[in-house]
Amino acid sequence: MKKVYCDNCKNNVEYSIRKNYIEEYKNCKVNVLENIGVCNSCQKDVFVEELENANLLRLYDKYREINNLITRDDIIKLREKYNISQRDLTAILGWGKMTINRYERGALANKSHNDILKIIIADDIKFYEMVDNAFLEKRITKKTYDSLFEQKEKSNDNIYKAIIEKVLTHDASIFNGYRKFDIDRVQTLISYMANKFDGVYKTSINKMLFYIDFISFKELTQSITGLQYIKYTYGPVIEKHYYQNIIYNLQEKYVYEEIETSDSTNTIVKSLNNYDLSIFNTAEQLIIDRVINSLGKLSATKISSLSHEEDAWKYSDMEKFISYEYADKIKVSY
């Protein structure tokens, strides 16, 4: 066995291990095992670096788990995701040179650092905002900046899809038609709509998605997209107004154009004609076609007016979720 220095014996000694439990740390009940070296000669406690390091790691890991704090693996995965070094990440965040190194070796992140790391792990956009700032403030080189943004451009749709899916995905319930949100179904539907009419207005997309989902729930007892809708001034809209994120940030199956008029700017979506309708079953495709053929040629204003006649809109609270229970009372002709 490796010997360690004993302050009491004034000599290098062999040691045994006694076990102890740390019950509390930073006002938090942790109940973590620690191993303590004991001199075999005088039976006094001795400092054993390996044991102390392992004790701290167990303690910190337990404290992180209880308080839902960032882990060493979380930070390592973040760097691997963007293929950056500890030095680069530290520079992007504007922290001390060894900060990320210490955290990856097991040190506890302070509250401010923990909160920032949580944000950029969950939100790619926030991360790239910090990259922008770091470059402007000359904390990272142009080579690092270009490399990161080259990665962003290559996976731009994937980044936004992940963000949108995280926001719009909920457990199956009466508010999403008992289907979990499916971004591929939404994109396919939008592209198909746009192709049918050589372009479709943003406002019309919102309402047609609503009718497609609610009529599907009425006839098939399940929505087609898994979207949740809220009551808004101009009719039902996708929760958090995320139809804008879906249209503006995803460019796999469609693109958008801004149409200027004398008194306003309208957004029209154009299909890239690369959708695959086989994602829907036959019954779903029939509903989709009936709704699109019925509403697709109407103006956005007309479709909005029709949606105002629906009990789903009239009897829901403003900015609150619309229950699919109203599907049985859909009035629009389809």
Image (tube, rainbow, N blue to C red):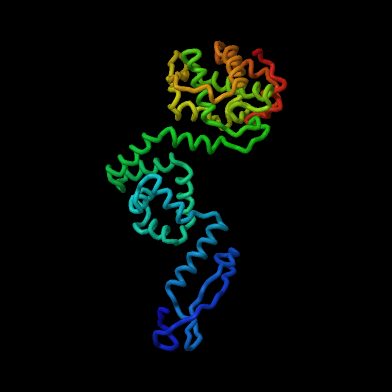
Q: Is residue 205 left or right of residue 73?
A: right
Q: Is residue 17 above or below residue 311?
A: below
Q: Is residue 155 above or below residue 90?
A: above
Q: Is residue 146 left or right of residue 317?
A: left
Q: Is residue 146 left or right of residue 207?
A: left
Q: Is residue 113 above or below residue 149?
A: below
Q: Which of the image's four quarters has the N terminus?
A: bottom left
> In the image, what residue occupies the spot 46% across and 52% down?
74
Q: Nearer the viewer, residue 25 or 329?
A: 329
Q: Position of residue 144 (x, y in %)?
A: 30, 44
Q: Quadrant of residue 19?
A: bottom right
The number of callouts visible is 0
Q: Position of residue 23 (x, y in %)?
A: 59, 69
Q: Position of residue 106 (x, y in %)?
A: 44, 61
**Is residue 259 visible from the viewing direction of this image?**
yes
Q: Which of the image's four quarters has the C terminus?
A: top right
Q: Nearer the viewer, residue 112 or 16?
A: 16
**Is residue 189 visible from the viewing direction of this image?**
no
> In the image, what residue occupies the spot 53% across and 71% down?
34
Q: Is residue 115 above or below residue 203?
A: below
> In the image, what residue occupies the spot 60% across and 37% down?
170
Q: Quadrant of residue 103?
A: bottom left
Q: Position of residue 324 (x, y in %)?
A: 68, 28
